[in-house]
Image (cartoon, rainbow, N blue to C red):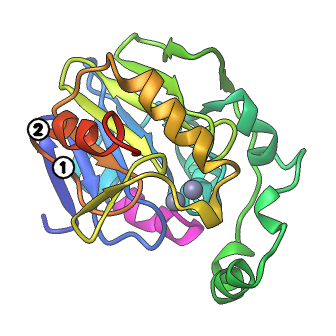
Amino acid sequence: VQNIAEIVPGVFWVKGTLGSNIYIRMTNGGRPIVIDGGFPSDFFKIKKVLDRDLLSRPVLAVATHYHLDHVGSLYELKRRYGLKIAAHQEDANVIEGKEAFEIYKLDPFRRIYYTALSPFLFQYKHTHVELKISGVKSFLPGGELLAIHIPGHTIGSIALLDCENGILFSGDSVRNEKGRIEGPPPQFSTDSALARRALRERLIDVDFNILLPGHGEPIVKDAKKAFAGRFLRGEG
Ligand SMILES: [Zn+2]
Ligand SMILES: [Zn+2]
């Protein structure tokens, strides 16, 4: 099926999304976990994959951070499947609508970007975050995914480590666009220097072979080496 790629058995990349990359990881018990939610309109792509290809009700959707291109479909996913939403507690208030998006401190570049995207943004509905992640490293329920707090892109950005498969889901803390592995985009980040420091300190002792970024192409082998070359040596 062309709009889904199986990275390793049980880990899927939903292709052709408008917002962030969306991944689905099956638990060992065979239930889907959705990792990031794209824009609101990406709900239909996720639904198609879940209903037609995976045929199992998802239990959880994890947001790597609160940006609209990652949380857009969460409301509809919850409405349709009754799943729970997980995010770091530092970002949960924004996802729930209790705090404003700091991104609206608009500079001209952002204003153009958000004006162009406004037809999609306005469909966004806030949603309750049932599972608020805290601490530097903590396992999600079931113990198959480790959430690693990487503050900087947003203050509550997380990466998820799938220890069994050696996969790091990096959210926007690491991107891989146009064949280049990079940190978060400064113009959309709370503190990109902090993000680089957190990437160095918190991922130096973390092993992974595959990197599934929030934007750009998955790196399907030797990902830690590529990451280390960019972030653990030199200026990063
Ligand atoms: Zn993003
Ligand atoms: Zn982002």
* Residue 183 pos. (x, y %): 44, 51
Q: Are the residues flagged by discs 2 and 1 in contact, CB closer than 8 Å?
A: yes
Asked if residue 47 lies left or right of residue 79, the reply is left
Q: Amino acid at mark 1?
A: Ile
Q: Residues within 10 Å of mark 2 (few under 14, many from 20)?
A: few
* Residue 153 pos. (x, y %): 60, 48
Please report the residue visible at 35 percent of the width from the left and 26 percent of the height from the top: 161
- Foreground disc of the pair 2, 1: 2
What residue is disc 2 on?
222
Tell me, yes or no, whether the highlighted magenta stretch contains residue 110. Answer: no
Quadrant assignment, res 164: top left
Please report the residue visible at 26 percent of the width from the left and 36 percent of the height from the top: 228
How far is the residue under mark 2 from the one under mark 1? 8 Å
Tell me, yes or no, whether the highlighted magenta stretch contains residue 45. Answer: yes
Q: Name the quarter where the C terminus is drawn.
A: top left
* Residue 6 pos. (x, y %): 14, 48
Asked if residue 193 lies left or right of residue 35, the reply is right
Q: Which residues are magenta?
A: 38-48
Vertical relation: 153 (above or below) 102: above
Q: Name the quarter where the N terminus is drawn.
A: bottom left
State ligand 2's quadrant. Answer: bottom right
Asked if residue 98 lies left or right of residue 44, the reply is right
